[in-house]
Structure formats: structure tokens, C-alpha cells
Amino acid sequence: MLLDYSKSLSNSRRFNEAISVLSICSKLIPELPMENVQFLVDDLLQNYSHEARKVSCTTDPWSCVFCSSVLEDPVTLICGHSTCKRCLLRDLTTVCRKCKVKYEPIEEDPIDVEPYVKIDILVCELVKKFWFKDLEATKLRNAGNRLFQRGAVQESISKYTEAIELAPHDHLSLSNRSNAYQQCKEYQAALEDSEKSIEIKPDWGKAHFRKGMALAGLERYEEALTEYFQCYLLEDSCSKFLKMEIVKVFQLLITAGSGDSDDQVKFYGESERSSESSHSDTEEEEEANDVKRARKLLDKNTKLLMTKNKELSGVLHMIDGAVTRLVSNPPKLGPRPLRSDQADKEDLDCSLCFRMFLHPTTTPCGHTFCRSCLDRSLDHKQECPLCKTSLIGFQSNIRTNEFVAETIRRIFPTEYSERQKAQEEEMNDLIKASQDGRHHIPIFVCTVSYPYMPCPLHVFEPRYRLMIRRSMENGTRQFGMCLGSDQDEFSEFGTILEIRDIQYFSDGRSVVDTIGARRFKVLERGAKDGYHTATVEYLHDVPPEGEELSRLQEQHDKIHDLAVIWFRSMTEDIRAGILSHYGDMPALEADYWRLQSGPAWCWWVLAILPLDHQAQQQILSQTHLIKRLEAIGKILGYMKRRGCF
């Protein structure tokens, strides 16, 4: 009855009372069932699960995202973070531990995956330069791990010691030696190593687990539990082994108990005598009544239970305090030590532009380039510029290599600042505008587009892929659209298109959703990196005044009504096609005659009228609204006379 009640208290998150009831039970039965202690532990872990989501293992850009140690055979994930090849092959989650971004297995082979995981060549060279001793220590630690797995524990301790002497700040070697000491029952030595490991890497969960094991071996169970729960918060999940150790220590604490056992037995006897009056009920009713009486008696004597088990209640307070401290004040770690004099500026130059890396990105084959350089190369061919490995689908997932980018900022801050400034000047040059109203814009040579009208584009030529990308990078999100011309390459008048959305395909092509904005007149033609550019001035309608305005309004209403009649006379299939592409006819704006391109419905009608390119250009260049309306009226009148509607 009391065991069932302890479960009920535990489920209700009344842990102090639950553990007190279990303590009473431990005095009344030969052996406390492990199942009941496990219920308590499961509920405690569940209680702190929301806190565990707030704490994570932090890693600087120069350490493995999984083991937080020096990068051994580094591999850069698609998110831009780096990991040891060994750690990547062991990881079953396919999720970066640092940013939680899921990565795809790299050409996984069911027989032998290892050859398909490519080393990041640049990062590998830099790691060898900066942390040669750490890599040697890693080899010794790996040798120690192999000896430990074969059962040669003392020999493994010797290897770990050599590794620690070579790299004293390696938390993994200290943690592993602590585990080896634990196996030899040298608990004090195991405790010292685990504490040093925590001092170096306070958010390394395994070090807290090693410390907990050492404390449990020294019979310091309360402290062991606080370390186990800190390990739980820092690890991604609670392993079966960790949970088993927590249950084992709780079992030892509860069965050790505290207080006067005679009083507790007498207390149990009272509840037992109280249940005798229900002997005539069924077995199920007796059990229900027992639980009710137990709850009533225990609720009345909660203070007594708490008083009798101050030691057990104190353990729960210790655990709660350790969790709170870890969540509210997470450890702050400094970057991995690095000697700047060991780096050469040439090591950080892009092999395509021969300048210092800017937004470096690493391909799945392990080569690093500036993001813009790689983009331009992939526009022409979807393969690595150096080794010709196919990179189909990679362009849409390009991310900055954190290791290389942060190394440049850390070692060459002045040069990095100059490189960034040069890039900004290049971007500003693309969007420069003079004070006399002349604007420099890129030109997409294709067809005639109109203000306010949607214009989806299929972009596949390398020059236009570069142009669209630059329009996005410099923040303008716009470019000019002109009709092609045999004489001057493109027409004299065009429309600015604003990018609303872009859908990329795996081979680098894209569908760009744009909408027309201002009209312009070309003043000068030019070219940049393969695509056309132009110096233009924007066109604005001349606002009418006095009698001219009255005549404009009268003409406008007449032609608007005629356009509505024409559209309604179309067959249902044709209307549906127009509506799916251009949408409904735009509503009439207030003071439409003051707009720089007039009312939107005019351009909507012009977009669906069957006009040749010459007529389209003439109407697009017109800056008097009444003349545009008259042109539309003439076309609609001609179509009406021909019986088109």
C-alpha cells in the first residue's frame, strides 16, 4: 500500500514525500523493490527534461562539434561546422550538435562508408600547423582507448598519462584516465582527473558522469547524484547506463534511511489496523480503501515524514540547486589556444580570385573557396573547380566555413577588415546613382514588362544567375528588363523589376518571381562580368491640370468601362488563364492621375492585349496618361468593330 502511494506522490511531483514514504518501506521489508526507485528516478528525470533543453555543450570554431577536442581528420558539415572524421562516422543522429541542423549522409556506401567522407583539406593543414602536439596527444589517447578495450587497464593509464603530459588541456584524456582509474578502484585518483576535466570543459557531460562514478565509489552518494543530474542536462539524452547508476545510488541512499525506525513501523501498523475494518469488502475495494487511508494518514503526518528524512530531502535540494545553477549560469569557455605567428597569410587565399577568403565555403570534396567565387564557377558548371567532382545540388546549400572564417578574423583582423571593405565598395558600385538622377542598373534582356504586372522568369544562363545573385546580395532586389534589339543589343525603354521570391533547383537554375515597378529610359549602355548594364533615368507621367484633368477623367471612365466589357466577353477558359497569370483587374486608385505610371488597370489591359513589340515600346515610353488611354481606346474600338466582343 505504501509503495503504491509513493508512486502516486512521485507522479504528482511530490518528490520529498515520495522519497520519505520509500524510506519507511525500506525499514519494513527485507529489500526495497528496484522498480519503485526507478519510478521515482523516471519522474525526476521527466521533471528536469524541460531544463535539459536549455543547456547544451558549447564548442568554439576550432574544436570538434561532437567531442569538443582538437579536429582529427576534420570534415566540414553542410552547416559550416567542423567535426572529426571518427566522430562523424560514429554519429547516428545525422544532426550537428552545435546548430542542430540535419545533414545528409555523404554518399553513404552500405559496405564501406569511410572512403566517401572527404577531409577538409585547408582545415586539416591549419590544424597540423596550429596544434601539432594536440594531434600527437590524440594518437596516444586513441592507443590508450584500444588498450582499455582489450582489458589492459594499467597500460591504458600509461598511454593516457603520456597524452596528458603532451597536451595538459585535453579534457578527453583526463576523462578517459579517470574511467581507467575507476576500473582499478582507485576512486580518489579518478575523482581528481574528472575534476580537472570539468575545470577545462565544464559543459562536458561525460566528465560529470566520471566524477559521479568516482564519488559513488567513495560512498559520497549525495554529491554523486548531483553530478549525474548535471550530466543528464548536458547530454542530448539519458543513456540506460546513466539511469541505472542514478537508480543504484538512490537505492543505496533510501535503504540507508534515517530517523527512528520504531516510530515508522508503528506508523505503518496504524494504517494496517485501520484497514482491518474493511475485511468484508471485496479484494479490489480493500485495496482502494487501503490507499485512501494511507493517503489520509500520510497527509496528516507529512511534517513527521519530512522531519524523519531530512537527509533524503536534502539530497533532492542539492540536485535542484545544481540544476538551477547550471541553467541560470551556464559555463563560459574561451577559444582554443592559438599562436598567430604560426599562420601564413597565403594559406588563407582563395585559389580562384587569389585574394583572402571572404565568406569561405567548403565543398563536399574538401576544397575551400570564397562563396561568391564558387557561386560564379557553379553558374557555368556544377562541379568543383579543382578536382571536378560533381556538385549538383550544392549551390542552394552553401554555408560559411566557421573554422576558416573565424581564423581569419582572429589572426588577420586588419586584412579581413580591408577585404570586407573592398567587397562593400564593389557592391556599392553595382547600385551607384549620381546626383543628377542618373542610375546605374543591371539589365535582363528578354521581353517587354509593365509596371504593377507580375513577370516570372526562368533563369538558367550563367551571366543572369550572377546578376540575380548580386541583386539579392546588395539588397536592391531589383534589375531592369528590356526588349532585345539587333542594333543596340537592347531597347531604349524598359521597366524595373522587383524580386519577390526565388525558387532554386538542384542544378543551379531558378524561377524568379518579379513584379514591375518604375519605367526608365536608357541613356548609356554597358556590360559587367558578362551581363548588360545601363545608365538610365526614370520616367514619370506629367500630371494634368484644369480642363485637361476633366477631359482625362471623362476619357478614363469611358475606356475603363470598355475594357471591362471586353474582358467579360471572353470565353471562360481564356479568362481563367489571364486571371491565373496576372490576377484580377486592379481596382481604381484615388488620384490615379498623380501616380508616376498612372492607374494599374491600364497596364493590366496592355499586358493581355495582342500588341507587337513596337506598339508596346511606344506605349511604355509615353509620359502622358491621356495618350496611353487613347491608344488603348483605339485598340479596343478596332477590336469591337471587328466583332471580337
Image: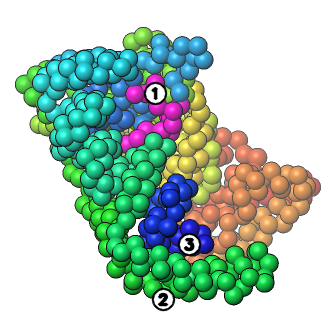
- Find out whether residue 324 is within the magenta segment: no
Looking at the image, can residue 43 be seen? Answer: no
Judged from this view, the residue extending furthest toward the top is 387
- Closer to the camera: disc 1 or disc 2? 2
Residue count near mark 2 (Cα–Cα under 10 Å), binned few <14, some 14–19, many ≥20: few
Q: Quadrant of residue 632?
A: bottom right
Location of mark 3 (residue)? 2
Q: Is 56 on the left-hand or right-hand side of 508?
A: left
Relative height, residue 130 to residue 266 (above, below):
above
| Amino acid type, callout 1 | Arg
Q: What stretch of residues is rendered in magenta?
A: 87-104
Q: Who comes first in sequence, dot 2 or dot 3?
A: 3
Q: Give SS at disc 1.
A: helix
Relative height, residue 31 to residue 336 (above, below):
below
Q: Which residue is found at the position 41% from the left and 60% from the top?
A: 255
Between the C-alphas of marks 1 and 3, the distance is: 45 Å
Horizontal and vertical percent position of residue 641 = 88, 57
Location of mark 2 (residue)? 300
Location of mark 1 (residue)? 90
Q: Which residue is found at the position 58% from the left and 17% from the top?
A: 109
Q: Who comes first in sequence, dot 1 or dot 2?
A: 1
Q: Which residue is found at the position 72% from the left and 85% from the top?
A: 278
Q: Is 327 on the left-hand or right-hand side of 267?
A: left
Residue count near mark 1 (Cα–Cα under 10 Å), binned few <14, some 14–19, many ≥20: few
For the stretch drawn in magenta, what is the main secondary structure? loop
* Foreground residue among 479 and 367: 367
Q: Give SS at disc 2.
A: helix
Horizontal and vertical percent position of residue 415 = 14, 33
- Closer to the camera: disc 1 or disc 3? 3
